[in-house]
């Protein structure tokens, strides 16, 4: 088959960030954006600049840092959103504004309280306004999956005429099924008279577990951009997973008349980075990036793979960036070796201070753990973030006693707003006692919704990576911590989550507010 270019539009930093608890700082966004650039994604949707001053600054920082990918900002079909996006993207090498308005009957009547005519008028106005800032304008009819196809044709024709160069069809609520979504895309491309003047894109949510299947059905029917996220992160059940789309298209070239320019060997690095920063662990059986994705347990499979790999493997682990757990650094490695190994796995630092903080942690870890693997390095960098000087809470020291027949007891000293505060508690187990001791100081008033521990590498001296999810008044935050001692990792994760709860939430949700 011929090979058209399939544009990969990554929205981890925008739709991914809308996942409850997945919010990221400006520096974290820049770090992920650089990894996405190295992965060679075509477009990085960096955020929703009008959501808050923090989001504006983050999009601006990504736009300044990224050279090889187009940087995109989301804007409701409102002048103030579009102007804010235009301003945030001013320094980008290549900028795109993505504006949207809902087109389904339920959204128009119940959310927007607008007539279809008003929606068309506002969509056209928004696209024209966005063209003041860039030629690269994308328009999305939100909830297209539940919109009338005739009305979609009308809106799309009008926005293409107004200057939209990409028209994106979102299945906002994950309602579509593959054959029907594929038909919808084909029908739109055939019926919109000026369809040849725009790239048709799709953006699928995973509420029925069909986001990837729907996206691929759309590609088979003419879509040439797919919007997706690393690890399938995103609102509710998430978005289509980038790694699955890319590998499906690459592996089944016999079924797709197109391919991406993605450097697939960067996939695992990106997956780990996003998981580490957001605190959303990757399930072991997740396609492509799960720890078991290339592991063969049964004797028959192992035997087959040893004799001839393709008997049970359709992709090569190394092609998506899996490497053997090999020791990369040790106790005697110097700062330069540390820095260059990190660069090889896609991690660079903005300042010497950040590098020094991570290197100090590396030395501490190397004292406890003989062999340092790439996975350890990845968490060191995430962990260095937890040390950020502007956090209100820091772990100073802790002591935990757990003995058969005795009630576990924890003593913790935290630094809170620069002041050292001691706390102590007993609990059902050492982790419970530790969390209660921290709460006796912080009084966060949160409910613990999730506690999970993952081993980062193998061996009993491996670091444990703990994720803690806390909820307060409907707001959800995730915290993460890593250490060779899982009780310490748990305390770090809990403190990390508390630091997030203590920060005021000042951002608007792009799809929440009325236009
Ligand atoms: O899911 C959705 O409809 C969106 C739009 C803003 C494109 O995320
Ligand atoms: Zn979405």
Image (spheres, rainbow, N blue to C red):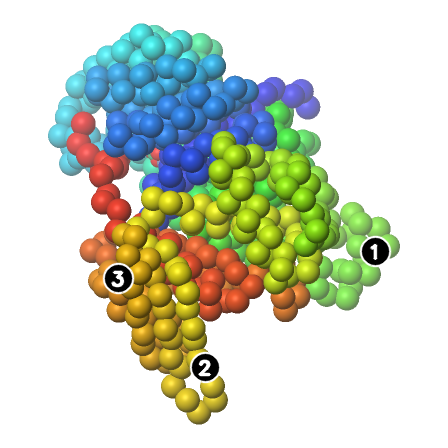
Q: How far is the residue under mark 1 from the one under mark 2?
A: 45 Å
The C terminus - image quarter: top left
First in sequence: mark 1 vs mark 3: 1
Q: Residue at x 38, y 41 (%)?
A: 24
Front residue of 55/71: it is 55
Residue on which disc 1 sits:
306
> Residue 343 in the image: x percent, y percent?
62, 35
| Above or below for 328 versus 38 | below
> Residue 6 in the image: x percent, y percent?
56, 24
Residue on which disc 3 sits:
442
Q: Residue at x 40, y 81 (%)?
A: 408
Is 18 placed left or right of 352 in the picture?
Answer: left
SS type, badge 1 = helix
Ligand 2 within 8 A of label 3's CB? no
Q: Residue at x 38, y 75 (%)?
A: 410
Ligand 2 within 8 A of label 1's CB? no
SS type, badge 3 = helix
SS type, badge 2 = loop
Categorize mark 2 by other alpha carbons within 10 Å: few (<14), some (14-19), many (20+). some
Residue on which disc 2 sits:
402
Categorize mark 1 by other alpha carbons within 10 Å: few (<14), some (14-19), many (20+). few
Categorize mark 3 by other alpha carbons within 10 Å: few (<14), some (14-19), many (20+). some
Residue 359 shows up from this direction: yes
Front residue of 195/505: it is 505
Task: Give the quarter of the image for residue 71.
Answer: top left
Q: Residue at x 24, y 57 (%)?
A: 472
Task: Give the quarter of the image for residue 113.
Answer: top left
> Residue 236 in the image: x percent, y percent?
35, 47
Q: Which mark is residue 147?
A: none
First in sequence: mark 3 vs mark 2: 2
């Amino acid at each position: 088959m011929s090979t058209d270019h399939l544009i990969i539009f990554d929205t981890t930093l925008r739709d991914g960030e809308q996942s409850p608890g997945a919010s990221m700082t400006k520096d974290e966004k820049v770090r992920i954006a650089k990894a996405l650039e190295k992965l060679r994604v075509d477009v990085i949707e960096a955020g929703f600049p009008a959501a808050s001053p923090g989001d504006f600054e983050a999009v601006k920082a990504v736009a300044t840092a990224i050279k090889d990918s187009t940087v995109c900002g989301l804007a409701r079909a409102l002048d103030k959103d579009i102007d804010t996006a235009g301003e945030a993207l001013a320094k980008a090498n290549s900028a795109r504004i993505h504006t949207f308005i809902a087109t389904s009957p339920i959204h128009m009547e119940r959310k927007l309280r607008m007539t279809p005519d008003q929606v068309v008028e506002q969509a056209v106005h928004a696209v024209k306004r966005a063209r003041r800032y860039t030629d690269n304008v994308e328009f999305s009819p939100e909830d297209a999956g539940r919109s009338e196809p005739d009305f979609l044709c009308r809106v799309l024709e009008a926005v293409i005429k107004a200057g939209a160069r990409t028209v994106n069809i979102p299945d906002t609520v994950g309602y579509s099924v593959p054959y029907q979504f594929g038909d919808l895309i084909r029908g739109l491309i055939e019926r919109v008279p000026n369809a040849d003047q725009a790239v048709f894109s799709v953006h699928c949510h995973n509420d029925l577990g069909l986001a990837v299947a729907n996206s691929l059905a759309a590609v088979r029917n003419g879509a040439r951009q797919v919007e997706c996220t690393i690890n399938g992160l995103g609102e509710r059940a998430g978005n289509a997973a980038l790694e699955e789309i890319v590998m499906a298209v690459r592996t089944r070239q016999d079924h797709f008349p197109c391919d991406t320019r993605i450097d697939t060997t960067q996939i695992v690095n990106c997956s780990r980075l996003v998981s580490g920063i957001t605190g959303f662990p990757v399930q072991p059986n997740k396609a492509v990036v799960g720890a078991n994705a290339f592991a063969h347990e049964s004797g028959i499979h192992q035997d087959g793979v040893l004799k001839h790999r393709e008997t049970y493997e359709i992709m090569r682990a190394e092609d998506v960036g899996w490497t053997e757990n090999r020791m990369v650094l040790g106790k005697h490695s110097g700062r330069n070796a540390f820095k260059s190994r990190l660069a090889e796995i896609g991690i660079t630092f903005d300042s010497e201070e950040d590098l020094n903080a991570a290197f100090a942690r590396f030395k501490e870890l190397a004292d406890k753990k003989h062999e340092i693997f790439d996975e350890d390095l990845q968490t060191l960098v995430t962990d260095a973030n937890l040390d950020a000087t502007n956090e209100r809470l820091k772990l100073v020291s802790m002591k935990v006693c757990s003995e058969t027949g005795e009630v576990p007891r924890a003593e913790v000293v935290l630094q809170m707003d620069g002041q050292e505060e001691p706390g102590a508690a007993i609990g059902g187990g050492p982790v419970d006692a530790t969390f209660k001791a921290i709460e006796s100081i912080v009084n966060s008033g949160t409910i613990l919704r999730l506690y999970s521990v993952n081993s980062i590498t193998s061996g009993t001296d491996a670091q444990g990576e703990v994720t803690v999810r806390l909820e307060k008044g409907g707001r959800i935050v995730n915290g993460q911590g890593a250490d060779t001692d899982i009780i310490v990792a748990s305390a770090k994760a809990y403190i990390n989550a508390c630091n997030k709860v203590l920060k005021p939430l000042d951002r608007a949700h792009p799809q929440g507010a009325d236009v």
